[in-house]
Amino acid sequence: METLSVETAEKEKEKVAHYLDREDIHQVVKENWPDLIPKLSEVTYPQESSHPDELEKWEVQKRLDRIALLNEHNGLESLQMLLYEECFGVRSFFGETEPFRDSLAPSPGGMVSHGHPMNVVDGASLEMLPEYDLHGSTAQEVIMSIEDRSKKEKLATLMAQTLYPTGFNSNYLNGGRNRVTRMALLNPDSQPKEETNTWALRLLKLVKTQSLNENVEDGELREILNINPGVEISLATYWTLLWKKMSSLFISDGGFRQPEDPAVKDAIGTLLKVRLNPAAGVFFSYFSPSGYLNDIDEGSNL
């Protein structure tokens, strides 16, 4: 199968070849979830931004390479892998060389699902982002621009939590890494790792600029996670909980389970419903998290 490529006209972004356009995938959907066939004609397709920087260009190519590899599989198995990769994939870079700027080329949805610190530490959470000005090219630059000491420390805590979450069921090494990251961000004489910029800061900017803190109103999405009427849940939190719900797709060692297993097939159908729901389309607008930020005017409020 040919490697996918991003085709762009002058100042216009064209649709990129996508697994949901494949005839064998359409046949799988028709056989298992015929009610979703009409929605395949209204899919949000990922693209590259109008003004990609070097990080975005690198990530787009890695994402396309990863997608091309998974496209070599067929039918239901391919749909299972590609759906998960597009919704929650966090690593498209595999190799012996160092990743570009500490990035493993995550999908936008994967950055949110895996980076959302579900627990609140010292008052720091994604919900506080509307109160913060996130203008700046580096995480440390953003933090140092804040005059209020309490707000500065909270933001550093939040950034560290997106990288090395602490609390119940977290990696035992995370505590030390979290403290080192937080201290480096708050010390103007230190140089934090590049991951604080390409992961932590981009995640926070993505959540803020794309309004991922807003309540999920869509009835179908709420029903999938059995969210009771009147209960508010942000789209960012929803996405993380959806990722956890999709654990039935995997066996204990992290490999994909057989797609013909009834529980697995049910999970695939659920994830496909979400993928085709316009209310979740924000996660599929760009290949790279940087795409959202690079297409925002410089004067936009971050």
Image (cartoon, rainbow, N blue to C red):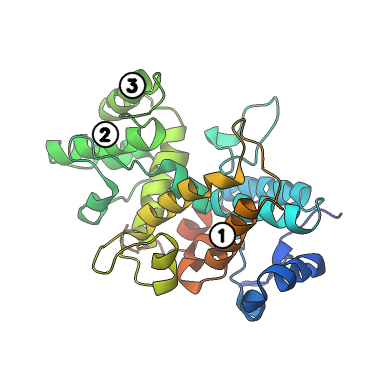
Q: Amino acid at mark 2?
A: Thr
Q: Quadrant of the N terminus?
A: bottom right
State left or right for residue 163 relative to residue 119: right
Determine whether label 3 and label 2 are within 8 Å by CB.
no
Residue at the image point whose x is 64% and y is 42% from the top: 92
Question: For numbered disc 1, what is the local secondary structure?
Answer: helix
State left or right for residue 296 relative to residue 287: left
The answer to whether one can see residue 231 in this image is yes
The answer to whether one can see residue 286 in this image is no
Mark 3 or 1, nearer chain start: 3
Of badges 2 and 1, the one in the foreground is 1
Q: Amino acid at mark 3?
A: Gly
Write down the residue under mark 1. Answer: 271
Question: For numbered disc 3, what is the local secondary structure?
Answer: helix
Categorize mark 2 by other alpha carbons within 10 Å: few (<14), some (14-19), many (20+): many
CA–CA distance in space, label 3 to label 1: 33 Å
Residue at the image point whose x is 25% and y is 52% from the top: 127
Of badges 3 and 1, the one in the foreground is 1
**Marker disc for residue 69:** none
Residue 168 found in image quarter: top left
> Residue lying furthest right in this view?
1
Determine whether label 2 and label 1 are within 8 Å by CB.
no
**Marker disc for residue 157:** 2
Position of residue 110 measured from the top left corner of the image (x, y, whole percent): 51, 48
CA–CA distance in space, label 2 to label 1: 32 Å
